[in-house]
Amino acid sequence: MIFLSAELFLVEMNRYMDPIVKLLGRWGEELAGVSIWSVLIRLGLAILCGGVLGAERAVKRHAAGFRTYILVSLGAAIAGFTNQFIYECFPSSDVGRLGNGVVTGIGFLGAGTILVTSRSKIKGLTTAAGLWACGCMGLAIGHGFYTIGIAAGIIIFTVLSLITPIENYFIDRARLFTIHVELNSRPDLKQLINYLRSKGFSISNVEHNLAYASSGLSVYSIALLAPYIKGQRAMSHTVICSMINELDYVNHAEVLL
């Protein structure tokens, strides 16, 4: 076993110390150890970061919202802090066991938010990924790695909220998409297909929706591939649906999400 001198031990400890802890000096040393203040600050920070992320999800009416994100972040922070306490009491213990269990457990929790709709669309992946990332953030805070915990919280919030408009912009201009079309009568389908082909669209699938059989309308889900014109910006799905809605024999058209 190799024993380090007090000076060398302090140098090694300072080398691997969290940047925020190092910046705070004597106050930081208090936050790095196991004390009442470090407990309160770590748990409070986990609640704050998890609450901010959960509020963003709750506003958008997702399955995992305010309370769920707080509990995931808080639980992970508790596990991380407990891990540190066990290691300080029993240095020979497995320091990574609790962390591994948290990451695995949150994976199962996130799997419960993923749904496959009747139209074979997968929903809830972002919520599941957000929960998993939130748990990792809480775990970092619980271990006293404040810098990565705070930075992770800011980045996760940015990805979940501020990047959404950018994502929607590209989704709205994807060449391959499916539209829901309500026609006045079944023979109108041939007219619509001919019209779309005349505009350069390719049709890969047409599915008759029998759920609207008693409505008096003929309803279809049509998978389209928009034309590619070099040097021109891709036409948005909103414009395409507006163009289809202007046809006399179309009752309503919208893009399926």
Image (spheres, rainbow, N blue to C red):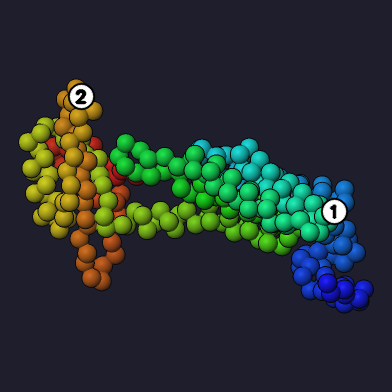
Residue 151: image quadrant is: bottom right
Residue 217: image quadrant is: top left
Instruction: Give the quadrant of the C terminus.
Output: top left
- The residue depicted at 15 percent of the width and 58 percent of the height is 200
- The residue depicted at 11 percent of the width and 40 percent of the height is 189
The one of 155 and 31 positioned closer to us in this rendering: 31
Q: Looking at the picture, how far across and down is residue 175, in whole percent?
A: 27, 58
The answer to whether residue 202 is left or right of residue 27 is left
Q: Can you identify the residue that label 1 sits on? A: 89
Q: Looking at the picture, how far across and down is residue 147, in whole percent?
A: 71, 62
The answer to whether residue 71 is left or right of residue 201 is right
Above/below status of 15 relative to 39:
below
Q: Is mark 1 on a helix, strand or loop?
A: helix
Total numbered labels placed on residues in the image: 2
Q: Can you identify the residue that label 2 sits on? A: 215
Q: Looking at the picture, how far across and down is residue 55, in whole percent?
A: 60, 42
Residue furthest top in the image: 214
